[in-house]
Image (tube, rainbow, N blue to C red):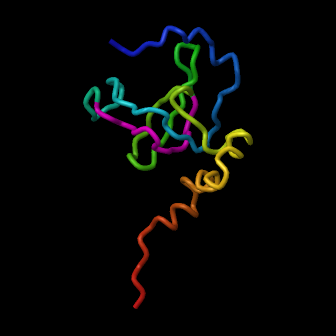
Amino acid sequence: MADINRDDDLIEVAFPPRFNYGERVIARAVIRNDGTYNGKDIGEVLVNKGEFGYVTSIDTFLQRFYIYAVEFVESGHRVGMRAKELCTLDNLPDVVLQGLGERAEALHKIGTRVQLETSQPQEPSA
């Protein structure tokens, strides 16, 4: 049986989407195939908790919920997810960034060109 949360009485589409196109987000939980992802078995892990990606499109489901298509960098999967399954990396509140202190700088680098360039193996110099 599907994991249906009965406390979803809120009609999300009455409000603006929580995330924007191109926004960096991180998965808050492991996401498994519920049968809607072609080429993978039901129950197979599509996205690991903590994996980051980019919002590539925003749609709705049942005229109630936003579904965010997220392209995850590490796995290469594009998965439709609800807002409650994601956390932003681009628009964290100032109070959260202050609480993170020096570690907040690392969040700014996740998935950015600077982080990607420094994570590439360096050619040995001759």
Seen in the picture, residue 105 relative to 124 is either above or below; the reply is: above
| Quadrant (top left/top right/bottom left/bottom right) for the C terminus | bottom left
Instruction: Tell me the chief SS of the magenta region.
Output: strand
**Residue extent of the magenta highlight:** 44-58
- On screen, residue 3 versus residue 20, left or right, reads left
Rendered residue at 61%/44% (across/down): 89
Residue 82 belongs to the span the image colors magenta = no
- On screen, residue 29 versus residue 94, left or right, reads left
Find residue 69 and report its horizontal and vertical position in percent. 51, 34
Task: Please identify the quarter of the rendering in which residue 125 is found.
Answer: bottom left
Rendered residue at 68%/44% (across/down): 99
Q: How many marks?
A: 0
- In the displayed orientation, state which residue is furthest to the left: 41
Residue 47 belongs to the span the image colors magenta = yes
Find residue 49 and report its horizontal and vertical position in percent. 43, 38
In front of the other: 75 or 104:
104
In front of the other: 103 or 84:
103
- In the displayed orientation, state which residue is furthest to the bottom: 126
Seen in the picture, residue 85 relative to 49 is either above or below; the reply is: above
| Quadrant (top left/top right/bottom left/bottom right) for the N terminus | top left
Find residue 62 and report its horizontal and vertical position in percent. 53, 13
Rendered residue at 65%/55% (across/down): 102
Rendered residue at 59%/56% (across/down): 109
Find residue 51 and report its horizontal and vertical position in percent. 45, 43
